Image (spheres, rainbow, N blue to C red):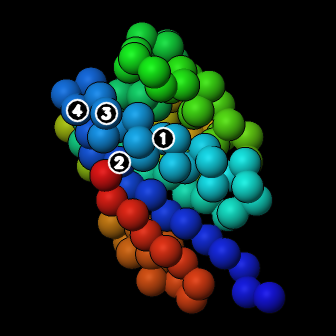
Amino acid sequence: MATRSLVIKVTAGKDDPERCNQAFTVAATAAASGVSTSLWLTGESSWFALPGRAEEFTLPDAPPLADLLAGILAAGTVTLCSQCAARRDITPDDVLNGIRFAGATTFVAEVTADGVQALVY
């Protein structure tokens, strides 16, 4: 049986809370289901790489973003776009443990690998 992998790129943050939460929910569900999951934080979602930022996010009738992020970090991969981080003056020393920095080359390699499905939110 082929390995299933899912790459999710989320660009929304507090500016579009429902779309943002949908991406985290799908990623956390996939990771908890045993699907190899890679969540990319880009654009406004980049801020959630910082300690305490996910805890500040709320959306009625949605699971806490901090819990979703913790689940993804425990069972999958979370990547902060290096260009997005640079535009926001976020450095590797600033982010939560387990979040890696990478750029477009790594993203393209992930989404073009065999057996990978990609979603963009």
Marks 3 & 2, CB-CB < 8 Å contact: no
Between label 2 and label 4, give the one nearer the viewer: 4
Q: Residue at x 55, y 57 (%)?
A: 38
Between label 1 and label 3, give the one nearer the viewer: 3
Residue 24 position within the rendered picture, expressed as x and y whole percent measured from the top left: 48, 41
Q: In the image as oriented, which residue stretches furthest toward the right?
A: 1
Q: CA distance from mark 2 to mark 1?
A: 8 Å
The amino acid at mark 1 is: Phe
Residue occupying image coordinates x 53% and y 84%: 113
Q: Is residue 112 above or below residue 12?
A: below
Q: CA distance from mark 1 to mark 3?
A: 10 Å
- Pointers 4 and 1 in contact (C-beta within 8 Å): no
Query: In the rendered image, which residue does mark 2 sit on?
Result: 10
Please tell me the numbered disc located at residue 18: 3
Q: Secondary structure at mark 3?
A: helix
Which of pointers 2 and 4 lies earlier in the amino acid sequence? 2
Tag 3: amino acid = Glu
Identify which residue is drawn at 20% across, 37% down: 87
